[in-house]
Amino acid sequence: MYPSKLIFMFLSILCITGNVYGNCLLINQTLDQRVNNNSHIIEGQIIDQISFWSNDNSNILTANRIFVYKSFKGNVSQDEIVLITEGGTIGDKMQLVQPTLNSNIGEVGLFFLKKANNRFVYSESDIDSANQFVSAEESLGFIKYNLRENTAFDSHNMYEKINENFYDKITSISNNSYTELNTFEFVNNKETDQINYKGTTSNPEVYCFFPQYASSGSETMISLDGTDLGTFVGNASISLKSASSNVGQYFMIPAENIVSWTNENIQFIIPEKVGTCKIRITTSDNNTIDTDEDLFITFARSKTQGILTYLVDCNDQGGYTFKASTSIANGGVNFSTSDAFDAFERAISVVRENGLNFNIGGTTPININEDDDVNVVMFDNDANPLSSALGKMYRQFSNCGGEWEMVGVDVRFKRASSGPDVINWNYTESNPQNGQLDFQSIATHELLHGAQLKHSLNPDDVLYYVFSTGEQRRNPIACTDVSGLKYVIEQSQAITPMCGLQQRYEYPPEFIGYNNLGMNACAHSEECDPSTYDVGNDSITINVVILFEGLLNDDGKMNNGLAENELVPDEQPFFTAPFYFNSQSRMNEYPSGLIDWVLIELRDRFDPTNIITQKAVLVNEDGQLMDVDGTIGVKFHPSYEGDYFIAVRHKTHLDILSADYITLTNGTSYDFTDSMDKAMGNQQLQEKYGKYTMFTGDFDCNGIINVNDYNKWRVNSALINQYVGWDADGNGVINVVDYNLWKKNSSKIGNSFIVN
């Protein structure tokens, strides 16, 4: 039975822009244009999705099965139709396309459609080809309904009262009445379920949240402090702004992203595809408030159904090489000899300086996108040119038993004369004039999509979702666009490619370095940092003891060579892969007996892979963890009282996890050094001088001591007075002693719950 009553419990707000182009740089087709330009307008709900190969086996497509409620234009004779969209996953192959109409099972709204041509028809469907369609308008081809609010919205507009004003607007433009095939009822709309702001049953307030600067798609956790926040029951929810298809609209984050919710503290994981916005909290009694400050989303890392994708070396030069298409099919334009080529080449030069190893060299007669080992940059020289999209990025991936590796990338641009709209491109190095679109800016935007990055809601970013005529955004912004590149590249360099002859991704020789790009000046989160803010006398102090194998001397104390030579950094060193710990923890002076920094984590007692909170702290020569002021013990906010696993992580030693969860109250102690059984897993501690120590040699911090760690040592195996991650004995000198310690522990595997 298909649904006739739909209750959607997400929130949305108006997002209107006066710019001409938006949402992955689409031409902003007005509602009138979309109604008039498409043969079919259908109201329906997506009830199933299945990926399949196109009839020529060149591309993966997805068949979206839609249960039809109303037909506003075009004849539909049955209850279900199929909408074909580009991209999908079949076995160990995946193809992603930006932009395209991305929607999920269960979503309901209005679809603007055209008949699918033979290449796109899903021949194995039980729905005949006459009832199979495509969306030429990409994401603008779907106006999503918010049934709770009785509103509809796309990336540019909100439409009030679906069953009254919106229906009337569509029928007046099309000059047709609609045909109702199936019905549904609007329930819990704003007339019967008005949301109260600062209601009478409670008065929720937010003091602060941490971090204020974070990224999307990186599993970053937000900790929010306040009063009268209630508990996570009933209508309680957290909402953030979308940076995806319906950009600027608030949506409720999934329940599984809520880590904990108490009357004074909420912790949640930032989901994918969100942008800078105020955090919206709705309590269980329907009181809703927004935070005073924005949660600033620096970048959005691309994921597909939770799957991470990685860059590899596909051209024996560390990255990917584009070939320029020479095709002039269908009255098209030879890209290789057009003025666009020079603009694209300039965009390539810019992204290479920022660390993205894309190149252009040679030509090809190919003018289609497919998984063919040729990366093509082209115009839309086909019988169905781009309609709304100014450019399209096509990426191909393979999974060969490891990670999803990007094995191909194509990019296609709209010709100046193609489609219903004439584009006035600026191909020159000069700034665009009024009415001109800057080709180099849009090419740079598309190339960053190729680096696994999504849209931004920060207006200065190259990846900002809206682009206007007469403006240019050619240079990636260090603290946002480049920060995202850095994140993806470091993740990509940490995997071992397994597909074909691919090797690890490498920086291009033109890369000028992150310091030179000004990333040291980026704003950081400070207020409400659980590592730094004063929790007063009510704090929970726990006492944890650990020892490093590589540093332990026969007197039971650890070597303090790093501190003696003043090599221990004042600021915590866990910003980079694989930790990505965004905190400003720092010490003002070296405390007595200082050895190094460690990262301590409280992990979920029911799921030890789930990090509840982290704190960068110090360790002294006796192995006692210290706060940054040198006092023994680690202080946590009183809201963290409860049951947790404790993890301790270090830049050269194998991470450890407590053997069982521990009840944290003030004064709790846990000594990893007095028994092999104190760390979870098979022999996760090493006996030395009658104590139990963390294994040394995990130089890349991925939980496995193997040849990759050796390679980090081998490249720089003779250093003096350096603070690096392959200093196994922690004395600031890199030599054969570090190699010998690594060799002794090679093939050792850490705890599987600590996933890097």
Image (spheres, grey):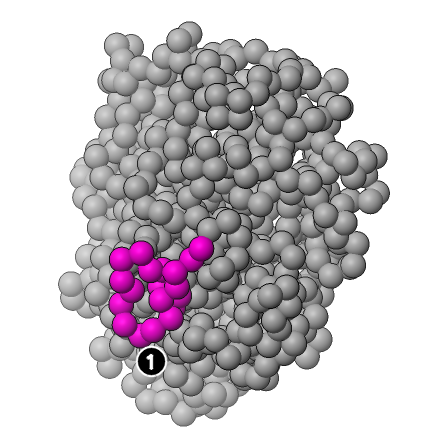
Vertical placement of 693 versus 224: above or below? below
Instruction: Compare residues 746 and 142 and report the one nearer the observer.
Output: 142
| Residue sitting nearer the eye, 504 or 446 | 446
What type of secondary structure mainly makes up the magenta span? Answer: loop
User: Image quadrant of residue 744?
Assistant: bottom right
Is residue 441 something that shows in the picture? no
Task: Give the SS element for disc 1.
Answer: loop
User: Nearest the camera: 417 or 365?
Assistant: 417
Q: Position of residue 487 (x, y in %)?
A: 42, 63
Residue 424 in picture, x, y percent from top left: 39, 60
> Which quadrant of the figure has residue 103?
top right
Q: Quadrant of residue 599?
A: bottom left
Q: Classify residue 281 as left or right of residue 656.
A: left
Q: Is residue 590 above or below residue 46?
A: below
Percent position of residue 148, x then y? 46, 18
Image side of residue 441 versus residue 400, left or right:
left
Kind of residue indicated by mark 1 = Ile
Out of 304 and 389, give the one closest to the viewer: 389
Region in magenta = 422-440
- At 33% from the left edge and 80% from the top edge, which residue is drawn? 512
Residue at 42% over, 44% down: 28
Residue at 69%, 50% (x, y): give it. 61
- Location of the N terminus by quadrant is top right
Q: Residue 408 colored magenta?
A: no
The residue at which mark 1 appears reads as: 512
Q: Is residue 94 left or right of residue 428?
A: right
Q: Is residue 563 above or below residue 62?
A: below
Magenta span includes 439: yes
Q: Farthest residue in the top direction?
A: 192
Q: Where residue 83 sits: x, y (%)?
A: 67, 38
